[in-house]
Amino acid sequence: MRQIKKKTSGAARVMNRALGLMVARGWMNICAIASFLIVGRFLSPTEFGIYALASSAIMLPMTLIGAGYADHVISRDQEGKDEATAFWSTAGLGAVFGLLAFAVGIVLQTAFGFADIGRVLVMLSPLPLLWGFSAIMEAMLIRDNRAGMMAGITVAAETLGLVALLASVLMGAGVLSLVISRLVNNSVLLGIYFIFLRPPSWRRVNGEAANRLTKFSLGVIGARIMNWADAYGVEFVIGALLPTALVGFYRMAGRLNAAIGSILIFAPWQAQLAYLGERLKAAPHRSGVAVQRALQLHMSLTAPLFAGLAVSAHDVIGLLLGPAWAQTAGVLTIMSIGSITQVIYGVLTAVLIAGGKTRKLFYYQAAIVVGTTAALMLGAIWALQGAVLAKFAVSGALYISGLFLLVELSPRQRLRLLAYITALILSCGALALAMQLMAQLVPRSEAMLPTLLRISACAVAGLTAYVVALRVLAPDAARLLVLAARQRRRRRRAA
């Protein structure tokens, strides 16, 4: 038992360190979902599709800003020697991208006739500049284990952004309410960062550090482009092959699914990056154990939530958005099932970045984008659900195959993980079966309270079945969850 506890401590520290990040990402996604749901009640899927295309375009420069530089500050610059170079380089890049987004928006309106998309893009063009000054400050807080402060700042900015959205909707701004909310959110975030944090002095900018950071960032930048293509570029493919309204259905389903993913996958990822960076440097011979435990703990926690959302998608969409968005439910079911394996990709990315293997990461990302885009285009023959099913089936297979890129894992550890994933799939199947059986006992209703009771009853039944199945099929993972929870409770009592 002591040996198991010792192996568990690393994974438990990661989850403990990620708590502040999860609070920040959690509130961020609550506000984002509330924004989409509020506006979704006033917009048609076609109008929402127009915003989705414009915001996807602005997300490309937003994704590139800080790429590699922020990751370096978090995982490889514990002394803070390169933070000034990273800060001012990222700020300059944000200014350039902001001007470029403004110019592209004007061209879309005047030369190509996409007036609606171009107008939204012009209004969103300040976002790269605002994020350019914020990205490295956020990375500094994460590196210094000040996630609690970051969570407080994020909650304040997101809350004010949501208030701005409500005011804009009441004044009849329509789709522009989402634009106003994003601008207020990012402006407040930057303002608070400058109040509570001292920006690094530009006098500390170092040419040699800039050159070194740029080389480190090349693979990360390539991976971020591939990640954007996989997450947002898909919408341009759907818009080219299918009606614009289906882009709105896809974005809405993606936003709801990402709400859970951002909390349970993205937020812990940054803590995992810092932790794995320390482990690879301090005890490389134990890195395989750390990766195995992190994957088992992380996937065991996320799988039941994604699987539960997949089973209850029709009830959730009906409750939140109404019958006009019914097509979103099928898309959400497919996305949620596919997202279970995304944890593997997150850990793989953290290991490769922490180990400086960014070129390998880029090649892996490129394979994912090429494979999923081809599958999406082929699946579009069977409309939106066929496209989404083909995309997420291929991405899930590629994520699982990524285990073979982790040289830190021994063959025996890799086989154990594959056996664990099989057990996890069966446990999620038990969850889905229990939820379906409970759904037959609780009648469907269009009223809010009966629908909430139906979803809650199904969730309790499914979670109970999942815990029992996991205990039988994957006892090591079940014990890992229990020990991690006990260790965290002891630390809270000691504190």
Image (spheres, rainbow, N blue to C red):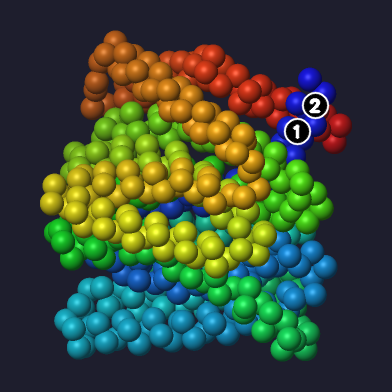
Question: Is residue 483 visible to us here?
Answer: yes
On the image, the x and y values in percent for residue 100 come to 41, 85
Query: Which residue is pictured at 55% across the width and 67% down the height?
Result: 359
Q: Are the two marked residues, 1 and 2, in contact with CB atoms closer than 8 angstroms?
A: yes
Instruction: Tell which residue pokes out farthest to the front in this image.
Output: 411
Query: Which residue is pictured at 82% across the width and 53% down the height?
Result: 282
In the image, residue 130 sits, relative to residue 321, either above or below, namely below
Instruction: Tell which residue pokes out farthest to the top in this image.
Output: 441
On the image, the x and y values in percent for residue 46 come to 18, 59
Between residues 72 and 322, which one lies in front from this camera angle?
72
Other residues around mark 1 within 10 Å, as few (<14) / some (14–19) / many (≥20): some
Instruction: Tell which residue pokes out farthest to the right in this image.
Output: 494
Question: Is residue 321 visible to us here?
Answer: no
Say what amino acid the circle numbered 2 marks.
Gln
In the image, residue 143 sits, relative to residue 262, either above or below, namely below
Which part of the image, by quadrant, shows the C terminus? top right
Residue 307, by quadrant, is: top left
**Does 347 sit left or right of 10 as displayed?**
left
CA separation, marks 1 and 2?
A: 6 Å
**Residue tagged by mark 1?**
7
Mark on residue 476?
none
Between residues 39 and 417, which one lies in front from this camera angle?
417
Say what amino acid the circle numbered 1 marks.
Lys
On the image, the x and y values in percent for residue 90 come to 60, 78
Residue 416, by quadrant, is: top right
Query: Which residue is pictured at 33% across the width and 64% down the height?
Result: 233
Query: Which residue is pictured at 35% across the width and 33% down the height?
Result: 310
**Residue tagged by mark 2?**
3
Between residues 311 and 441, which one lies in front from this camera angle?
311
Q: Regarding mark 1 in the picture, which secondary structure is present there?
A: helix
**Does 322 sit left or right of 466 as displayed?**
left
